Image: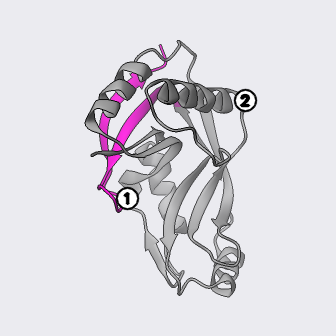
Amino acid sequence: MPRLFTGLAVPPAVADALKAYQGGLPGARWIEPGDFHVTLRFLGDVEVTVADDVVEALAEMRVRPPLTVTLDGLGIFGGDRPRALYAAVVADPALTDLQAEQERLVRRAGVEPERRKFTPHVTLARLRRDATPEATAMYLSQAPVFAPLAFAVDRVTLFSARESTGGGPYVAEADFPFA
């Protein structure tokens, strides 16, 4: 059973710039820069037949112009139980439309509906229990100033992750160009 998700790959130059924000947070498991991406739709562990149906459905993605993704700051998911450090993606109607189309296509392929709200981001670290709210607040207050980073994307990538555990290294299984 492959563990799959669709996303937007972060180009190497932007990934290199994001490395400046990695380090100095106890309890962080830092993501390899080559694995940075913006998840559009997490599918989870799916049967091979469903994975094949997903590939067929994604091939029907409509034509669209390239879009610009802008990262504009750092954030923490989890509040009192921090679980991830991320670079936030600026809200953009074209990105929201792309994600909604991903949802429709994978549901048509037999994947259960997503129940979480789409919050576009690039995960920089997964946090263990020793990454306390106090430590994450201190990290955010002392992190270098986040200069916005922008990059153009012209395709969606279907990625696979290690089964059951998630996390990288991620493998690009297929690309679906916008045009």
Between 160 and 108, the one nearer to me in the picture: 108
Q: Residues within 10 Å of mark 1 (few under 14, many from 20)?
A: some
User: Is residue 147 visible to us here?
Assistant: no
- Crowding at dot 2, Cα within 10 Å, few <14 / some 14-19 / many 20+, comes out as few
Which residue is under mark 2? 93
- Residue at 59% x, 32% y is 99
Q: Secondary structure at mark 1?
A: loop
Residue tagged 1 = 166
Is residue 178 visible to us here? yes
User: Of marks 1 and 2, which one's residue comes earlier in the chain?
Assistant: 2
Q: Residue at position x 42%, y 20% from top?
A: 57
Residue contact between numbered discs 1 and 2, judged by CB atoms under 8 Å: no
* 176 falls in the magenta region: yes
Residues rendered magenta in the picture:
153-179
Say left or right for 118 vs 151.
right
Residue at position x 35%, y 42% in the image: 46
Please say if 13 is above or below 33: above
Front-most of residues 15 and 155: 155
